[in-house]
Image (tube, helix red, strand yellow):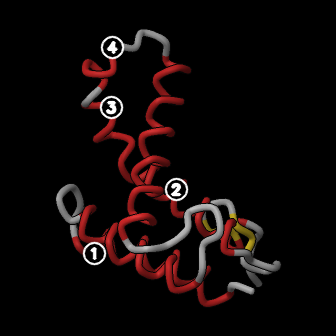
Amino acid sequence: MQSDEDKMIYGVDISKKITPIMIRDAIIDCFYKAHNEVLDLAREYFACNSEKKFKKMKQQQVRDLIEDIFISTGGDFKKPTKKALIQVIAKLKKFAAIYRETKVIERHANEIMQLIDKMT
């Protein structure tokens, strides 16, 4: 029997209805968590003394990156389709290859693909 934690992928309960917006937000969450350390290295460039404000700035940076990738693939950030989500994942995998090992990237991409496969 699965525990409640096993049913969650980046805040999305896989036992319930999954929408494209939920997957888009899961992608943002995944990418934020995966690149938090990289963004921390750039802290001095943000000139931000408040931890809360810095966290918000990092979240906005990731959201902007994801939105730009939707645009570059011809997708709609506000109304993502299955095709657009798959294209965004493919592009993020290439981007992440700069910072992460292939094995880690594939694991995260596969988790997101589980959500896409269950999307309604």
- Label 4's element? loop
- Mark 2 surroundings within 10 Å by alpha-carbon count, few (fewer than 14), some (14 through 19), many (20 or more): many
Q: Earlier in the sequence, mark 1 or mark 3?
A: 3
Q: Quadrant of residue 90 in the image?
A: bottom left
- Mark 4 surroundings within 10 Å by alpha-carbon count, few (fewer than 14), some (14 through 19), many (20 or more): few
- Residue on which the image places disc 1: 103
Tell me how far mark 1 sits from mark 2, CA to CA: 20 Å
Q: Residue furthest right?
A: 16
- Residue on which the image places disc 3: 40
Whether label 1 touches label 4, CB < 8 Å: no
Q: Quadrant of residue 92 in the image?
A: bottom left
On the image, the x and y values in percent for residue 11 come to 67, 60
Tag nearer the camera, 1 or 2: 2
The three-letter code of the residue at mark 1 reads Lys
- Residue on which the image places disc 4: 47
Whether label 3 touches label 4, CB < 8 Å: no
The three-letter code of the residue at mark 4 reads Ala
- Residue on which the image places disc 2: 28
On the image, the x and y values in percent for residue 2 come to 74, 80
Q: The N terminus is located in which quarter?
A: bottom right
The three-letter code of the residue at mark 2 reads Ile
Which residue is painted at 44% across and 57% down in the image?
66
Q: Could you say which is closer to the camera, residue 1 or residue 83?
A: 83
Answer above or below: position of 59 versus 95. Answer: above
Which residue is painted at 62% across and 70% down in the image?
23
The three-letter code of the residue at mark 3 reads Asp
On the image, the x and y values in percent for residue 40 come to 33, 31
Whether label 2 touches label 3, CB < 8 Å: no
- Label 2's element? helix
Tag nearer the camera, 1 or 3: 3
- Label 1's element? helix
